[in-house]
Amino acid sequence: MDEDNPVTEFLQTAQTSYEIGVFGREMRFDDGATFEIWSFETEESERGFPGPNLRVKEGDIFHATVEPSMGPHTMHWHGMEPDPRNDGVGHTSFEIGGTYTYQWQPEPGRPGDPNYGAAGTYFYHCHVNTVLHAQMGMLGPLIVDPVEHPDHPVTPGARRAFVDGPEYDIETEAFLMTYSVDPRWHEMGHAEGLSGEDVGLNRFEPKHFYMIGGELASRRYGDEVVWGMTSLRANVRGGLKKPTLLRVLNGNYMPTYIEFTDEAGNDLRMAEVISHDGRPYRDTSHPNEPAPPCGAAGYPLTTDCLSFGAAERYDLMLDPPAPGRYLLKARWLDWITSEVLAERIVPIIAS
């Protein structure tokens, strides 16, 4: 249901707010290929890809006022659970033709309690003609930061991943989104396939594969800037700074496999998995006792690889054993045959 200017019910004063527009333009990626991209923008971010980084703290009222300029759109907060009017799913509420202010409030975490808290890695995307609009680029990172609890103080220059979670270095905190492009889709129009015609949206055949992202604190914005990951910094545990947190999102429709190796290509267990889809991994083996994070309970979930599907997110604490150069490899797999369609490699510089 298309509405020009739906009213935000029970509007409250926001602690975090964004003014967001929609745009479309040609963009050049790191392999030289150029595609029509649609995405979201703020005044600060300008017209780049992916959409701007959005952050909110647990307990704060969040506002995002979106003003689509090229047909009706929505903003869906993937992994959050607002009421239907603010969830951004058009067929259960409305699609926005004029402007609308989304409003929601992430739940504060409680130390040792797996039933409370929203801190973690999410993303937002348009939910109109969803598979096409997300592929066209209408998505971006959404991060919920935890409340600071007096029993879990935070070191200057650091932040906790969740209320009682491990501390990480703000300067080197990074975001990685695996993304792929089927050029045929990028020649389609806004409403292709919505009238029942078969335009091939059930056939996703990517020809280009990208590792999107970088350090969150120093993302470079600008018109037609594609945020491509060319390298990754990681702090060695036990040094002067807290470890590096890598937030990972599968932003395409193919299963993705990533692995961490030394410079020679040997698998290396240098990533601790601390959260999945905004939910921390905790020791819940004693129902009547606090549930600490797995690392604090004495068995960190360390790995050298990760296999995940579309829209999944993982939070990884990087733990390189010594200063030096390591590798992060990503492979895109055919969703039926598991054939490797492409591989990209990003160096990790540990210091």
Image (cartoon, helix red, strand yellow):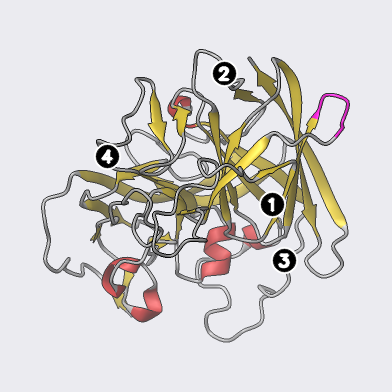
Name the mark on residue 204. Answer: 3
Q: Does the magenta stretch include residue 59?
A: no
Task: Examine the rendering and report whether any part of residue 41 can be seen.
Answer: yes
Q: Is residue 288 above or below residue 305?
A: below
First in sequence: mark 4 or mark 3?
4
**Whether label 4 touches label 1, CB < 8 Å:** no
The residue lying at 28 percent from left, 71 percent from top is 83
Report crowding for label 2: few under 14, some 14 to 19, many 20 or more residues within 10 A (C-alpha). Answer: few
Identified by mark 3, the residue type is Phe
**Magenta-drawn segment:** 262-266
Q: Give how far apart the Cα atoms at labels 4 and 3 are.
A: 45 Å
Image quarter of residue 176: top right
Q: For the residues carrying marks 1 and 2, which lies nearer the camera in this image?
A: 2
Distance, label 2 to label 3, CA atoms, is 45 Å
From mark 4 to mark 1, how far is it between C-alphas? 40 Å
Q: Name the residue under label 4.
A: 149
Who comes first in sequence, dot 1 or dot 2?
1
Is residue 235 toward the left or the right of residue 348 in the image?
left
As measured in the structure, the alpha-carbon distance from the residue carrying label 2 to the one carrying label 4 is 24 Å
